[in-house]
Each structure stands twice: as structure tokens, then as C-alpha cells.
Image (cartoon, rainbow, N blue to C red):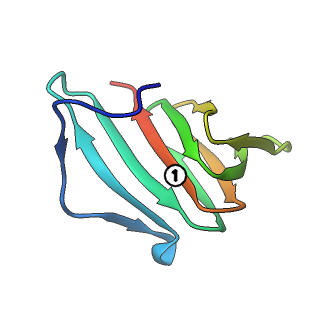
Amino acid sequence: MSQQFEHVSIDKHANIYFDGSVISYNLRFPDHARKTIGVILPSTVKFATDVPELIEIVSGKCQVRIGNADEWHHHEGGQRFQVPGQSSFEIEAIEPVHYVCHFSN
């Protein structure tokens, strides 16, 4: 994955979830692609998905459980995982996790 984005609009207003444990910003591209870029501070949080999402871990270490799975999977900087639409995932940030979420159109 690329180390930077070109030709992007960034919403100035932050998305703040879970009492400040997750902070992200919306990115919009000329081709109408949408992504968020943000950080998850050490915590365990659960997100619901509307559309399929590709989560790219830029740095940090975390455990992830997708949908109703019993197993947690370890992820760290340089790795990514996919979550189906109309599903959910739990993420336990062991240390601050910097991420990019790529939303399917």
C-alpha cells in the first residue's frame, strides 16, 4: 500500500468514537473513493460495517475478531485484514494503532 495519498480532500472535523479511544478523519478522492485514516488508542472496541472494508494497519499491534468468530488474530504494522459488509469486528489495540480504512464503493 502507498505511503501517501495524492489529490485528496480531508474533512477538518474529526470522527471521535468510544470516549476518544478512536479518532479518524474522512478522506475523499476524485474517483469518489472514501477512506478514513486514524488512530486507535489502547482499548478494545467493536465496529459495525455497512459495506466491505479493508483495514490497513500502518503501525502498532492489535488483535482482531471478525463477525461472530471465536478466534482473535494478531495484526501489526504493514498488515491488513478484510471485513465483510453488514458485519462487525472487534479490535484490541495493544499499543496505539495507526490505520487506514478503505471502504468498498
Q: Can residue 50 be seen in this view?
A: no
Q: Residue at x 58, y 47 (%)?
A: 59
Image quadrant in which the C terminus is located:
top left
Q: In this view, does 80 lie above or below 61?
A: above
- Where is residue 42? Give x, y as percent: 64, 68
Image vertical order of residue 22 relative to residue 66, above or below = below
User: Where is residue 50 drawn, in percent x and y?
Assistant: 44, 39
- For disc 1, the neighbor class at 10 Å (few under 14, some 14 to 19, many from 20) is many
Residue at x 61%, y 34% (from the top left corner): 78
- Residue 25 percent across, percent down from the top left: 31, 54
Q: Residue furthest right?
A: 71
Q: Residue at x 62, y 32 (%)?
A: 81
> In the structure shown, which secondary structural element does the residue marked by tag 1 occupy?
strand
From this view, report whether residue 105 is shown above or below residue 56: above
* Residue type at the position of mark 1: His
Residue drawn 57% across the image and 41% down it: 57
Apparent side of residue 16 relative to residue 83 in the rendered image (left or right): left
Q: How many marks?
A: 1
Instruction: Determine which quarter of the picture holds residue 65.
Output: top right
Residue 4 visible at all: yes
The residue most toward the front is: 3
The residue under label 1 is 98
Quadrant position of residue 24? bottom left
**Image side of residue 69 versus residue 55, left or right:** right
Query: Percent from the top left, x then y, of residue 96?
Result: 59, 62
